[in-house]
Amino acid sequence: MSFAGDGGARMGLAATNVGTNISTNISTNIVRTAVTSTVAGTVSQRQGHALALADPALLGIITAPPGQLLLISGPSGMGKSRLVAELHRPITARQGHLISGKFDQLQRKLPYAALVDALAGLIDQLLGEPEIKLRFLARSLQAALGQNAGAIAALLPNLSLILGDLPPLSQLDNQASQQRFHHSFRQFIQALSPAEHPLALFLDNLQWADSASLQLLEVLLSQGQIPNLFVLGAYRDNEVEPGHPLQQWITQLGEAQVQVEQLPLGPCSSDAVVELLADSLKVAPAEVVPLAQLITAKTGGNPYFINELLKQLYQNNWLNFDRDRQCWTWELEPIRQLHITDNVVELMLQQLQQLPEVSRASLCQAACFGPRFSISVLAQIQGCSLQDCYQRLKPALKAGLVQAEARSQDVEVMRWFRFEHGRIQQAAYSLISPGDRSKFHLAIARQLLQQSQASALESRHPIGAAEAVEPEQGFISKGDCAEQNGSGETNRSVIPGASPRQSCKECGLGGDRSFELIDHFNRGSAGLTDPIERRCVAQLNLQAARQARQAMAYSALVEYAEAGLALLLEDAWEQDYGLTLELHSLAALGGAIAKPITSTRC
């Protein structure tokens, strides 16, 4: 595997396309040269690490012994995620799966967020398999999970599309219920990673992982071996100080005899940048030494900074392709005078400020969703068409700040967009005032709720028709959000902003996006002024607390219960005794259980 660049990634082969391709070409070469950098910093060591991870013949060495964890660390911009992406081809060649999830700074309270994202994506992939394979998978999962399949389906609702109707879970006390969930999760992962289909699980931004996820990963890694599972994690070591929950978790894994391999990624050396530029610009290494030394000094060897600087040099015509001579030229003196920030967020802010105002405002609103956003929801919040919303985002797309997840010219097909880097989202979010953030989060929550209700009605299983569903399943029973007038009749009030107007009993939410919706509501709680809407959102927090309890995420249970209590009125004990009592009870239960867990595990 060559890290000097593919034929399609070599700059200068098509001079007519240089303006369009330069950033991609340079970026590809930088990543392949630099993402495997170690603290030692030599090119051969970098390529050695990459070959060990990416060469199919050596993949077995990396994954043995089973049960080990590879942690890739380094500051933002070192290429941790790109390094793991190199595993995709060799794993696919072995008919395995590489699945990934990313923890988000704005959604740190969401239990198991990255795990759910990764595994839900895998299930969606498996649902596309031929029917005979699905039947075999269903038998394997049923044999592994037995009567406990519902414990996993509570976390991954789309699992029921493979397994069909599931038996109800037996009632257990909290400790036994937690043990059942942990055991079932291990059995589930083992069933998904047979010898003929190894599984690599990558979790990014572990520095923001919730305590429930860390605890579940510890169970997965420490309680016996899962032969065909390889777990990778990445984190920003400069954000993990001594005493950080992640650092404590790594220590506990060592105490549990889990093999943890650390792969720190450091900056590129000047020699590595020379090799990169020589290959990209198609010149002898000696010719680019002054340029490479200058770029290394300006960027500190940070691959992300190097990429952004090279794009800036090209945009300012200090790095040009001479079509007559068919070669690249550059000017050292203007580069020498250029001020480059050593802060990634500041660099991103500079790029954002160069966007048209309407595009920048749209991108800031999108940042409230997290690292990934739906253009349809964004358009509805902005009150414009999909096409208009896309046009507002287009300058950000051209600048490489966001990208569509689906390759298409049809905005209806694109649907989902993702920030190119977490730091871009962070920078865009920082441009919004706290008051506006709250408004945007509330608008997102209301729109997501409306979509959920519409989806439930379309599937002929309206959330409002939940009379036969037990409350512990996470739905709001009939009348839960209703208030009575003096004559004893029910006032069917609604959450403001929902259309058409619907009964409050319909404000329940099922599925794997429920925590996301409620988190947006809680972030926008300052805008909840209507008493009926406040009660409805308090009921949603109760639902989330119940689901967190079922998923053994006790820290999240406490947070949702307390958020629900904060929304109740002063006379809640008199006017809303049942809701108030259950929220207090769950807050107390979660607090009693979570304290020893967080103090001993993470």
Image: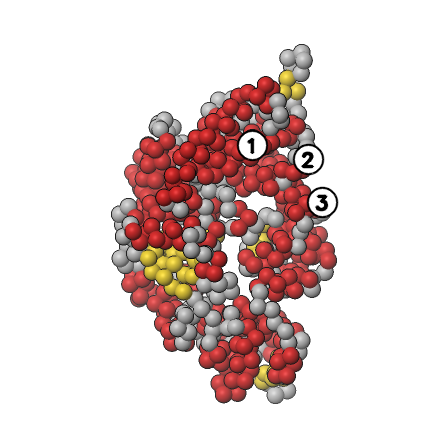
- Which residue does the numbered mark 2 point to in the structure image? 497
Callout 2 amino acid: Gly
In this orientation, does residue 338 appear?
Answer: yes
Above or below, comparing residue 407 to residue 190 in the picture: below
Q: Point out the frontmost of discs 1 and 2.
A: 1
Element class at badge 3? loop
The mark that comes first in sequence, 3 or 2, is 3
Q: Position of residue 317 (x, y in %)?
A: 66, 78
Viewer-closest of 317 and 391: 317
Residue depicted at 68% across the width and 57% down the height? 360
Q: Position of residue 110 (x, y in %)?
A: 49, 43
Viewer-closest of 162 and 529: 529
The mark that comes first in sequence, 1 or 2, is 2
Could you say which disc has been placed on residue 564 in the image? 1
Q: Position of residue 213 (x, y in %)?
A: 42, 45
Q: Quadrant of residue 343?
A: bottom right
- Which residue does the numbered mark 3 point to in the structure image? 383
Residue depicted at 39% across the width and 68% down the height? 50
